[in-house]
Amino acid sequence: GLGGIIFNDATGPISRTGVQLSYAYRMPVFKDYKLSFGLAGSIYQYIFDNDKIILHDNLLDPAMPGGVEKTLVHDATFGTYFYNDRYYFGISVPNLIQSKINLKTVEEDANKMVRHYFITSGYNYIINDDFAIEPSILLKATASSPLQFDFNLRTIFRDYLWAGTSYRNKDALILMIGVDYNNYSFGYSFDKTLSDISTYESGSHGIMIGYKFGKQKDSDRDGIPD
């Protein structure tokens, strides 16, 4: 499989604009289980706008002289995925190269993209002809931060409607709802922050719209069969 992404992401004074290309190889291992390996490479422009930083009490910081700084960053991501029609287990490692972001206002080699580690697993359990439930878990860690987990539970009705909830430890409670119709997918989520940052924000909303090209086979679907 081949894939590509064009992205533009902005958070406060930091923005990233670039492209990512990916390749995946899938093979059967035993019975109905398959194993997939993926590798992606990316290059993007990293922009740091000093003028968008709001300093405490508007004090002058000589380390932040103002202006816009730009640099090119390249990196890679690796992942592997073991699955069948009901169960899946995956591992991915973004920022594999741990590229350095060389800006003029910081010491040389001071900024580096830290390698992240993700482990995910889930199972689609059929209750009856109408309902299925899908518990899953996501573990996240870096070398400089503690282990964090997301526990998710989704209920699926006739492989068409679904609703679920997710708990991210020490951070947030998420409610989700969506519909899958033919090759189209629509979803909505609301994140209610539980950490100390909740004093400054009231939650966030997410909207997902997806389309799968080509006709799906029953064996490739995650929900219960028709």
Image (cartoon, rainbow, N blue to C red):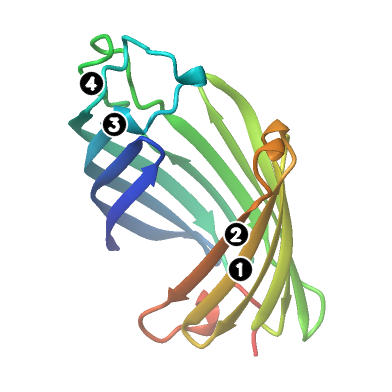
* Mark with earlier residue (1, 2): 1
* Mark with earlier residue (3, 2): 3
Residue occupying image coordinates x 46% and y 32% = 116
Amino acid residing under circle 1: Tyr
Categorize mark 2 by other alpha carbons within 10 Å: few (<14), some (14-19), many (20+). Answer: few
**Residue 5: x %, y % from top left:** 28, 57
* Mark with earlier residue (4, 3): 3
Amino acid residing under circle 4: Leu
Residue occupying image coordinates x 50% and y 34% = 117
Gap in angstroms between the C-alphas marked 1 and 2:
7 Å
Which quadrant holds residue 27?
Answer: bottom left
Q: Dots 4 and 2: beta carbons under 8 Å?
A: no
Give the labeled residue for mark 3. 48
Would you say 93 lies left or right of 170 here? left
Which quadrant holds residue 188?
Answer: bottom right
Amino acid residing under circle 2: His
Gap in angstroms between the C-alphas marked 1 and 3:
31 Å
Amino acid residing under circle 3: Phe
Gap in angstroms between the C-alphas marked 3 and 2:
26 Å
Query: Which label sits on residue 205?
Result: 2
Give the labeled residue for mark 4. 103
Q: Dots 1 and 2: beta carbons under 8 Å?
A: yes
Gap in angstroms between the C-alphas marked 4 and 2:
33 Å
Q: Dots 4 and 3: beta carbons under 8 Å?
A: yes
Residue occupying image coordinates x 64% and y 33% = 148
